[in-house]
Amino acid sequence: MKNNNRSEKKNPILEVENLNVSYGKIKALHGVSFQVYNGEIVSLLGSNGAGKTTTLNAISGVIPTQGGNINFMGENLVGIKAHKIVKKGIVHVPEGRHIFPELTVEENLRIAGYLFSHADEKKLLSERMDYVYSLFPRLKERMRQMGGTLSGGEQQMLAISRALITGGDVLLLDEPSMGIAPRLVEEIFETIFTISKSGQTILLVEQNAMMAMEISDYCYVLETGSIAFEGVSKALMENDAIARAYLGESL
Ligand SMILES: Nc1ncnc2c1ncn2[C@@H]1O[C@H](COP(=O)(O)OP(=O)(O)OP(=O)(O)O)[C@@H](O)[C@H]1O
Ligand SMILES: [Mg+2]
């Protein structure tokens, strides 16, 4: 059983404090704060344009911030370049997947091991390849198929697998359910839960609030760039009135 009692936990592995992000004159995030503890799945919910993707992009260093701190294992990540943030242990599966369409499934996975250079890391790459193929047998069956010919759901599986091969202490997932058939969404969410059971910490961004709450420990609801609600996912799911008030359109 996981320990879901946050008050008993030590320091968060990732803590966003008072984050501000603007695109020109448009303020996308104003004063966003939240914590992710080791081993948790935390969901960041909210409707279109609430600022979910902006938050993940700021954490992984893809976009600049205009105020606030992003503390990861005691270090402030603000101002650090994206490629260095990956090496520090934050791995991001962006919205829209971004796999290599002209490469096979196997090649897409091998490329994710670009950070591995030593002989023992080559062994690690092959172990991680076996691990992701066991998580997603569909990918193993399609290892020689071109990435671009996979279905949307299979491409999402490939994108998550690549992130797992790169490896990181925190996995950022941006809307893994987007544009995918319900049957595959279910399979992907079950696998995200399995990945979490192995100890992987996950920050999950979703518009599909119900699916995200089912697998997450704790959730935050973003509304026009601010956190409007936070709570234990199970409690929020059981409190229909609050869930409707904050997540009406996403339920
Ligand atoms: N590159 C950009 N330039 C200008 N404004 C942007 C840019 N990216 C996002 N925004 C704006 O910032 C706000 C937050 O967008 P963001 O993409 O973070 O929302 P989201 O919660 O991920 O939405 P969705 O669920 O539709 O993906 C929106 O008002 C959006 O229009
Ligand atoms: Mg988004």
Image (tube, rainbow, N blue to C red):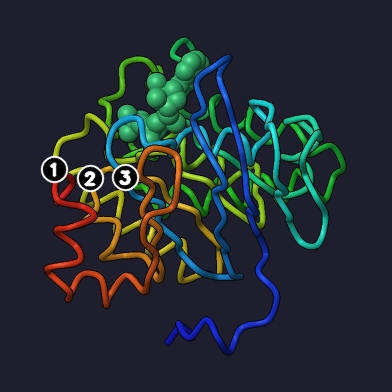
Disc 2 vs disc 1: Cβ atoms closer than 8 Å? yes
Q: Kindly report the distance in space between the C-alpha atoms of the residues bearing marks 1 and 3.
A: 20 Å
* 151 left or right of 39 in image: left
- Give the percent coordinates (x, y) of residue 243: 19, 63
Q: Is residue 80 above or below residue 196?
A: above
Kind of residue at badge 2: Val
Q: Is residue 133 above or below residue 195?
A: above
Q: Kindly report the distance in space between the C-alpha atoms of the residues bearing marks 3 and 2.
A: 18 Å
Q: Is residue 31 visible?
A: yes
Q: Mark 3 sits on what residue? A: 46
Determine the residue positioned at 69% across, 32% down.
66
Mark 1 or mark 3, whichever is nearer to me: 3
Kind of residue at badge 3: Gly
Q: Nearer the viewer, residue 42 or 46?
A: 46
Q: Is residue 109 above or below residue 203?
A: above
Quarter of the view holding residue 184:
top left
* 111 left or right of 32 in image: right
Q: Residues within 10 Å of mark 3 (few under 14, many from 20)?
A: many
Determine the residue positioned at 59% across, 50% down.
128
Instruction: Mark 3 or mark 2: name the one nearer the start of the chain.
Output: 3
Outermost front residue: 25
Q: Secondary structure at mark 1?
A: helix
Determine the residue positioned at 14% across, 44% down.
249
Disc 1 vs disc 3: Cβ atoms closer than 8 Å? no
Q: Nearer the viewer, residue 95 or 185?
A: 95
Q: Mark 1 sits on what residue? A: 182
Q: Residues within 10 Å of mark 2 (few under 14, many from 20)?
A: some
- Ligand 1 under 8 Å from disc 2 Cβ: no
Ligand 1's quadrant is: top left
- Give the percent coordinates (x, y) of residue 54: 51, 32
Q: Mark 2 sits on what residue? A: 185
Q: Secondary structure at mark 3?
A: loop
